Image (spheres, helix red, strand yellow):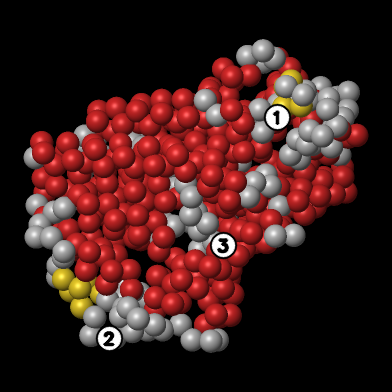
């Protein structure tokens, strides 16, 4: 029972920490390059303890929609009766090559996260690869580390992705290709370190009397797979649809124009808008409210997953009732993750309510003012705190950007590296990290067990980031 509510309690503890701080630390806003706190404290009162959690869920319900859409899709996949075969056949195909497959998944998720930054697009395929890894005999926590963990690790070493790298470039006024070779070198270092860390874990496989637990063992539970639903139908259509889904997500959620200067999809969407009948843009009106490829958000993602659920149901002759039944079964399995991922932005909600006047700004200002000019140590602490107060780095960087103005342009790339690395290190362990929350709750891994599992890697990477930061400062 304790484990059942562990993540909820962890989120609420973070909220109560903020509530406590709000009674003692005045809310500040940036005026020029200094912090102004003339407004005094803005404490959270008794009714706020109920109001802000509800406001958070109402504000960030779109993240719950993503989780429900993912659950619905996998519910339909399970309903076809061939998804379980796909998972188990893939696991069997790599029999005695399990470690190579594990490494391949880590590399795949980490690199895609770093280069593309499409965390929620990658999240769609996490249940599939977790299922395969579990069917091979790996523990849930190892499978989680290879997928969810790799997405977060890729963000730490973000190179081009719409996540961290792009946000740093936007806020600090840098260029996309600034220090790109050192960025990729850092990615290689982080990736190698993470692969060695996971593969070297003694608890990476489920063992029973010293032997690898095989997929036929009754104790093995593969996520979203019911053995009794297996069918003799062909797997190939399902594989084709999943590959097609992956390509669509890759094309639609990668910002080609900003990251690589590719305007193909922007121009194509403009051409669609120009197809008019009686001055009415027919194609775009039929499509409805949507963005061009490269600008798709959680809303388009959720809609696409629902569409694919119906198409897959049609391909496998489930009928409307069967498809809806599968979607309902899948959605019911992810109620907890959907609730938690919405509530997980509760501290972020407090930052948004402050409209630029927050206790985080005050804390950051005090820390950075401890030394004259740029200091990698205080900047590192600010980066770590940014990860606690914000789970969207863009807003966190924007809130304190003015504090770095006087440090000089030579230090801006170093500041960006430190803030990006420290922020995403926190996302690996903090209960307000949405990607982490979804993985822990979806695959029944406790926060305590995850913290014990990943803590050594976090410390190792923290030391490496600090060492690189010192070297970069000395080179200026």
Q: Nearer the viewer, residue 89 or 41?
A: 41
* Residue lying at 56% horizontally and 68% vertically, measured from the top left: 12
Is 124 drawn above or below residue 240 in the view shown?
Answer: below
Q: Secondary structure at mark 2?
A: loop
Pick the quarter of the image with the N terminus. Answer: bottom right
Q: Local crowd at mark 1 within 10 Å, few (<14), some, or many (≥20)?
A: some
Between disc 2 and disc 3, whose residue precedes?
A: 3
Pick the quarter of the image with the C terminus. Answer: top left
Mark 2 vs mark 3, foreground winner is 3
Q: Residue 94, percent across and down? A: 67, 15
Q: Which mark is residue 10?
A: 3
Place residue 136 in its image quadrant. top right
- For this orientation, the residue located farthest to the right is 228
Q: Secondary structure at mark 1?
A: loop
Q: Is residue 280 visible?
A: no
Q: Is residue 159 visible?
A: yes
* Residue lying at 34% horizontally and 28% vertically, measured from the top left: 189
Q: Are marks 1 and 3 in contact (CB under 8 Å)?
A: no
Q: Secondary structure at mark 3?
A: helix
Q: Local crowd at mark 3 within 10 Å, few (<14), some, or many (≥20)?
A: some
Q: Nearer the viewer, residue 247 or 193?
A: 193
Is 173 drawn above or below residue 58 in the view shown?
Answer: above
Residues at marks 1 and 3, CA–CA distance in whole angstroms = 28 Å
Q: Nearer the viewer, residue 454 or 275?
A: 454
Residues at marks 1 and 2, CA–CA distance in whole angstroms = 56 Å
Residue carrying label 2: 39
Q: Local crowd at mark 2 within 10 Å, few (<14), some, or many (≥20)?
A: few
Between disc 1 and disc 2, whose residue precedes?
A: 2
Between disc 1 and disc 3, whose residue precedes?
A: 3
- For this orientation, the residue located farthest to the front is 209
Residue carrying label 1: 206
């Amino acid at each position: 029972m304790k484990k059942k509510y562990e993540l909820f309690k962890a989120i609420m503890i973070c909220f109560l920490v903020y509530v406590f701080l709000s009674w003692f630390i005045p809310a500040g806003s940036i005026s020029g390059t200094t912090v102004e706190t003339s407004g005094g404290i803005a404490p959270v009162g008794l009714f706020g303890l109920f109001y802000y959690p509800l406001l958070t869920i109402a504000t960030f319900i779109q993240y719950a929609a993503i989780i429900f859409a993912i659950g619905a899709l996998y519910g339909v996949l399970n309903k076809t009766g061939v998804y379980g075969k796909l998972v188990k056949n893939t696991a069997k195909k790599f029999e005695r090559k399990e470690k190579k497959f594990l490494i391949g998944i880590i590399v795949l998720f980490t690199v895609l996260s770093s280069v593309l930054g499409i965390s929620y697009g990658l999240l769609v395929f996490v249940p599939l690869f977790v299922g395969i890894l579990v069917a091979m005999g790996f523990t849930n926590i190892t499978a989680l580390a290879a997928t969810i963990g790799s997405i977060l690790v890729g963000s730490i070493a973000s190179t081009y992705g719409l996540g961290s790298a792009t946000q740093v470039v936007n806020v600090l006024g840098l260029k996309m290709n600034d220090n790109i070779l050192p960025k990729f070198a850092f990615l290689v270092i982080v990736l190698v370190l993470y692969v060695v860390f996971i593969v070297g874990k003694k608890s990476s496989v489920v063992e029973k009397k010293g032997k690898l637990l095989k997929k036929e063992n009754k104790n093995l539970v593969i996520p979203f797979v019911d053995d009794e639903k297996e069918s003799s139908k062909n797997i190939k259509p399902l594989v084709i649809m999943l590959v097609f889904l992956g390509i669509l997500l890759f094309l639609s959620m990668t910002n080609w124009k900003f990251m690589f200067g590719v305007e193909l999809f922007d121009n194509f969407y403009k051409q669609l808008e120009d197809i008019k009948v009686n001055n009415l843009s027919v194609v775009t009106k039929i499509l409805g409210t949507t963005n061009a490829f490269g600008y798709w958000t959680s809303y388009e993602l959720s809609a696409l997953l629902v569409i694919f659920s119906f198409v897959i149901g049609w391909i496998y002759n489930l009928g409307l009732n069967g498809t809806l039944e599968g979607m309902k079964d899948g959605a019911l399995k992810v109620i907890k993750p959907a609730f938690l991922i919405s509530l997980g932005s509760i501290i972020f909600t407090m930052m948004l309510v402050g409209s630029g006047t927050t206790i985080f700004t005050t804390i950051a200002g005090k820390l950075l003012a401890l030394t004259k000019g740029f200091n990698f140590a205080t900047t590192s602490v600010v980066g770590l705190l940014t990860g606690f107060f914000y789970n969207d780095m863009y807003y966190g960087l924007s809130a304190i950007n003015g504090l770095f103005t006087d440090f000089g342009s030579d230090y801006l790339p170093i500041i960006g590296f430190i803030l990006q690395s420290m922020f995403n290190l926190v996302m690996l362990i903090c209960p307000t990290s949405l990607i982490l929350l979804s993985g822990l709750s979806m695959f029944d891994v406790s926060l305590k067990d995850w913290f014990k599992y990943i803590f050594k890697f976090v410390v190792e990477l923290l030391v490496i980031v600090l060492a690189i930061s010192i070297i970069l400062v000395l080179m200026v």
